[in-house]
Image: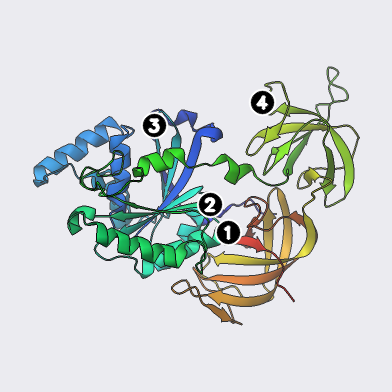
């Protein structure tokens, strides 16, 4: 099978400041994506976060201050901190998602700065697919526009646990509360609980990225707003529950058998926990084979000794009480709460290739650590990402289209619905001739009836 990933469809540029080495500490790491149109102030907001948390390069800050001064700007133009990315784009270099890193004493952050235009839907899906939170910028002068609704729709499809609508440029509407409240009401009617999107956790916060009001510190200009500033929201939002909930899941990466004189009987099963909690003594089943055993012990991958429990997203080595025939691509999960096993998948996909997806198309499919082959048996509908309406029975899916399809795999897969476990419910499709990633998919429960 080809070697690929969702990222193979995107050229990713990362700008990593000093001190970013410790970002592997997932317990204190929040991944969030930003979305907004060209004029919503996204670059200024990202620049403000980097500037006010003092995690931008010193030479970058000096350059931005110098350029701002020479241009006669009243303030330091923080959008210039990301101008390097735009300059590269103007030179003909395609940049899909730019990753930025910053940290505060309370938490570390990775920002996936995603394009906002409809023609880059695939890039937004790629950048937001691993996010714990999404910030959707809204221009206070324009309110909730079509593009804002599109970003919220994609956040809903991706099951991003937390969505923050940052109503920016409040300085340009005189810091007026009625302007903000009208946008807040529109957001909740469109995306909040009980709405068509029914996002579980929606927060609306007024800010001015240009002046810094309510970004890091509370804004004296808006005494009527009683909520926390944006950065405090990012520091306090719960993330462990979003990543580690549900039954335990351990997709196996490889089997470790040194077969040395020192360890003649060593057999360990290595992988990254994709959900729940594993502990010695747990009764487990290996899927799709159905073989059962009990966890004898768990080691931290890297030789840090035995563990009393393992949870997402830890990388561990599990030892079983029985000598069972399992290997790479198999799944260990509780006997009492196994994953689904089957060869027919209903899924929402974002099509990422110039060549359209058509029924009967054949592709390689990668799900967790398992490769298989898949046949597209049905195109159910295309999703209108402007309105959320379903367009049934399309002849094909084109570049950047979102749609629901049915797949038949050549071998059984052990999976969960994406809504229940994002790691266990996602996959990619790969063109075996070119090794290009052509789609990112989210497994859905089978259609009723």
* Mark 4 neighbour class, 10 Å CA radius: few under 14, some 14 to 19, many 20 or more: few
Contact, CB < 8 Å: mark 2 with mark 3? no
Residue 104 is tagged as: 3
Q: In percent of the image, x 77 and y 44: which residue is there?
A: 328
> Which quarter shows the C terminus?
bottom right
**Separation of marks 2 and 3 at Cα, in angstroms:** 22 Å
**Which residue is tagged 4?**
302
Secondary structure at numbered mark 3: loop
Q: Give the number of the mark in front: 4 or 2.
A: 2
Q: Give the number of the mark in front: 4 or 1.
A: 4
**Separation of marks 2 and 1 at Cα, in angstroms:** 26 Å
Contact, CB < 8 Å: mark 3 with mark 1? no
Q: Earlier in the sequence, mark 3 or mark 1?
A: 3
Q: In percent of the image, x 44 and y 41: which residue is there?
A: 110
Secondary structure at numbered mark 2: loop
Q: Give the number of the mark in front: 3 or 4.
A: 3
């Amino acid at each position: 099978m080809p070697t690929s990933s969702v990222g193979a469809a995107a050229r990713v540029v990362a700008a990593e400041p000093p001190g970013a080495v410790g970002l592997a500490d997932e317990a204190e790491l929040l991944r969030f994506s930003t979305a907004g149109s060209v004029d919503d102030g996204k670059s200024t907001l990202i620049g403000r976060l980097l500037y006010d948390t003092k995690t931008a390069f010193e030479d970058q800050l000096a350059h931005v201050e110098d350029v701002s001064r020479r241009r006669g700007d009243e303030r330091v133009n923080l959008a210039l901190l990301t101008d390097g990315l735009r300059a590269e784009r103007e030179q003909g270099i395609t940049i899909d998602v730019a990753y930025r890193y910053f940290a505060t004493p309370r938490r570390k952050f990775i920002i996936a700065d995603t394009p906002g235009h409809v023609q880059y839907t695939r890039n937004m899906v790629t950048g937001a697919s691993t996010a714990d939170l999404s910030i959707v910028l809204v221009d206070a002068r324009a309110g909730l526009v079509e593009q804002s609704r599109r970003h919220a729709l994609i956040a809903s499809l991706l099951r991003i646990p937390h969505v923050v609508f940052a109503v920016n440029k409040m300085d340009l509407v005189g810091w007026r509360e009625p302007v903000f409240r009208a946008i807040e009401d529109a957001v909740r009617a469109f995306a909040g609980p009980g709405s068509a999107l029914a996002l579980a956790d929606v927060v609306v916060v007024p800010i001015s990225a240009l002046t810094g009001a309510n970004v890091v510190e509370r804004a004296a200009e808006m005494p009527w707003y009683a909520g926390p500033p944006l950065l405090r929201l990012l520091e306090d939002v719960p993330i462990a529950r979003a990543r580690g909930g549900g039954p335990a899941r351990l997709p196996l990466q490889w089997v470790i058998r040194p077969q040395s004189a020192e360890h003649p009987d060593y057999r360990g099963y290595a992988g990254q926990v994709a959900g729940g909690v594993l502990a010695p003594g747990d009764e487990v089943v290996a899927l799709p084979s159905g073989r059962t055993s009990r966890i004898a012990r768990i080691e931290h991958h890297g030789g840090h000794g035995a563990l009393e429990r393992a949870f997402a997203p830890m990388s561990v080595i599990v030892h079983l009480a029985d000598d069972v025939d399992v290997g790479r691509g198999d799944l260990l999960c509780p006997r009492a709460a196994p994953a689904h096993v089957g060869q027919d998948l209903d899924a929402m996909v974002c099509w990422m290739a110039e060549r359209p997806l058509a029924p009967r198309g054949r592709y390689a499919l990668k799900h967790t650590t398992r490769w298989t082959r898949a046949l597209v048996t049905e195109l159910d509908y295309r999703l209108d990402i402007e309105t959320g309406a379903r367009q049934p029975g399309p002849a094909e899916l084109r570049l950047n289209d979102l749609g629901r399809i049915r797949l038949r795999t050549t071998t059984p897969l052990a999976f969960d619905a994406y809504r229940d476990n994002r790691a266990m419910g996602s996959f990619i499709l790969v063109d075996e001739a070119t090794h290009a990633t052509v789609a990112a998919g989210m497994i859905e429960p089978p259609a009723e009836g």
